[in-house]
Image (cartoon, rainbow, N blue to C red):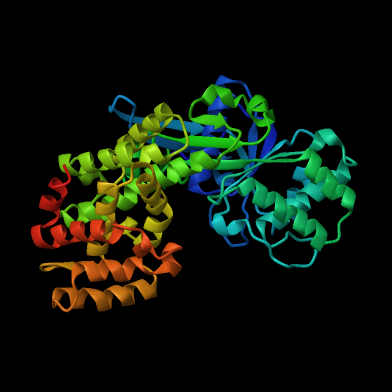
Amino acid sequence: MLRLNRRDFPGAHYSERVIQFGEGNFLRAFIDWQLDWLNQHQHTDAGVVVVRPRNREVADSLNQQDGLYTTLIRGLDTAGQRVSETRLIRSVNREIQPYQQFDAFLALARSPQMRFVFSNTTEAGIAFTAEDWQENQPAASFPGKLTQLLWARFQCFAGAADKGWLIVPCELIDHNGDRLRELVLRYIRHWQLPAAFAQWVTQNCAFYNTLVDRIVTGYPDDGAAITAQLGYEDRYLVAGEVYYQFVLQGPEALMQELQLAALAPAVKRVADITPYKAQKVAILNGAHTALVPVAFLAGLESVGEAMDDAEMAAFIDALLRNEIIPTLDLPRDELEAFTAAVICRFRNPFIRHALLSIALNGMTKFRTRLLPPLLQAQQQTGHWPAHLTFALAALLAFYRGEQGDRRWPLQDDESWLQRFARLWPQVMAQQKTPEQLVHAVLSEAQHWGEDLTQRPGLVAAVSEHLNNILVHGMRTALNALR
């Protein structure tokens, strides 16, 4: 079958203005996909050079397809209708492996038209390694490699103010742009590079804090059928959902130069990214965390099945709209729109999220995602929110690890696994009450950040739900919330 190449698939070829650290599925179905659309519809002329950030032998590279690949975007649109669209991406020009092509890597810095840097090197990628300066080889870390490029650019253009870069990390850490800038400046100090260079980086390079969101599943399970439809072989075919969000905190330059306003409201520039991060954590991630134990203990297996279940869908809808949204610091209409998008995403028929696969570290996830709105809701209303406390009770019931003849694996910190392995047999043998189990769990101040048993009425509220689940079963207990 025909393999992708630019001879048999001619089309626009864009000027190299973007350096991208990372060749993975997410960047190709997120950043490169957006740039390709902008190149075609807004004439932004932004070609990408991909830099593999890690030193490892690879059998394939995007160069074998002349940078071409296909995105498969599918899911439900805002009207709830199925969407499935393929797009041949031409925004990527070539790929460089800096450990084997160090001169070509540094040459990127000397290109006058190079302007943007995007990255996704995983959360662990934005880190400092106390390594020596090496003249003829790349630094081990991504921030170190970026510092090398910036130093080469500073030298080549004698610190010209207009040769600074717009740097856009997409790693999933808080204030990722601020963190990356801090590490670049740390490398400058560590390598004893001139103070004038540090000043140039600070004044003439913009580091954006970002929030990125799109589920990208990679090469699709039905890849053979898609290949037959396309009529060509594409080893880099990548599938993602319809929904995406790209929030940027930084100067206006990026929006203007890439004409990102054309992608609004999915792409937006904000003065403070913090409330958008809180929105995603509480609504998207929080809904997952609340749904998993409730739906699983009701006998369901996946997120999609749960959202097709009227009782589960009603539970999540009430939890989000009545208990979480009022605690967040964004306009109500924005929060409602985001919530509607989350529910639509959960119903995506092309993605099967097994509940057990997202149950990992549920205790930590509840603390980071749902404890803040739980406490805030109580402060606002004077009573403990029924659905959030029910979700916590369901989580504790889930950590029993069994229900009748049904058993499931638990994955969490060993301390929690040992604690539940001790507590639950005592409850089932009636040596302890469910309330004593709840008290023991909520008193773990090292985990929760405080002794939650000191919050009046919380132990009682969670214990009542847990007792109902144990005595009557999940379905009956859930119906009692109405």
Q: Quadrant of residue 259?
A: top right
Q: Nearer the viewer, residue 302 or 44?
A: 302
For residue 103, say whether it is visible. no
| As drawn, 201 above or below 77 | below
Which quarter of the figure is the C terminus placed in?
top left
Q: Nearer the viewer, residue 229 or 309?
A: 309
Left or right of 317, for residue 67: right
Whole-percent x, y for residue 32 in the image: 55, 37
Q: Quadrant of residue 193?
A: bottom right
Q: Quadrant of residue 62?
A: top right
Q: Which residue sits at x=31%, y=71%?
A: 440
For residue 438, say whether it is visible. yes
Left or right of 358, for residue 102: right
Left or right of 188, for residue 472: left
| As drawn, 94 above or below 133 | above
Q: Which residue sits at x=14%, y=62%?
A: 470
Q: Which residue sits at x=55%, y=56%?
A: 123
Whole-percent x, y for residue 349 in the image: 27, 39
